[in-house]
């Protein structure tokens, strides 16, 4: 009788923990991609296209699909030194998880990361 009451609760806790861990790992990978893009775009002479490619390479390396990369403001070769550049990378949780959404995946549809650096 006790097993019939406790087992479903234990399974919900276990599955929820796995889903939460997947979301945390996805956020860490997105933060890595955003950092690499920000580092690239804030370097002298670099452009947003090169930074987007760098972020996409990180996403591909970690096997993340459906990621979007946004760089604001648009960085060109004439962007003044000291301009704050924000790189935002997001991806859907459902297509980047090892299992179908059950608990956490239904509450959180996508995960994102943002990095802000000064243009050099």
Image (cartoon, helix red, strand yellow):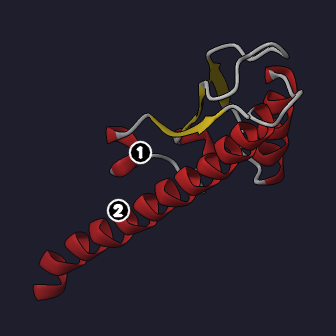
The numbered mark at residue 71 is none
Q: Residue at x 89, y 27 (%)?
A: 45
Crowd around label 2: few <14 · some 14–19 · many ≥20 (10 Å): some
Q: Position of residue 11 (x, y in %)?
A: 32, 71
Q: Quadrant of residue 65?
A: top right
Sequence-first tag of 1 and 2: 2
- Which element is circle 2 on? helix
The numbered mark at residue 105 is 1
Q: Position of residue 120 (x, y in %)?
A: 73, 35
In front of the other: 3 or 62: 62
Q: Position of residue 106 (x, y in %)?
A: 36, 40
Q: Position of residue 85 (x, y in %)?
A: 61, 27
- Which element is circle 1 on? helix
Q: Left or right of 32: which side holds 11?
A: left
Q: Residue at x 77, y 49 (%)?
A: 63
Above or below for 52 versus 15: above
State the CA–CA distance, disc 1 to disc 2.
Answer: 9 Å
Q: Residue at x 67, y 52 (%)?
A: 32
- In the picture as drawn, the residue positioned furthest to the front comes out as 81
In front of the other: 77 or 47: 77
The numbered mark at residue 16 is 2
Q: Left or right of 70: which side holds 41?
A: right
């Amino acid at each position: 009788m006790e097993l019939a009451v406790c087992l479903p609760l234990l399974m919900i806790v276990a599955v929820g923990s796995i889903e939460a861990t997947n979301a945390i790992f996805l956020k860490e990978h997105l933060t890595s991609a955003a950092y690499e893009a920000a580092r690239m775009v804030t370097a002298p002479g670099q452009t947003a296209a090169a930074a987007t490619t760098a972020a996409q390479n990180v996403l591909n390396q970690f096997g993340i699909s459906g990621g979007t990369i946004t760089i604001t403001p648009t960085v060109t070769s004439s962007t003044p030194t000291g301009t704050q550049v924000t790189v935002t990378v997001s991806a859907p949780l459902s297509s980047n998880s090892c299992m179908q959404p059950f608990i956490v995946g239904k509450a959180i549809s996508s995960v994102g990361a943002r990095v802000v650096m000064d243009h050099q």
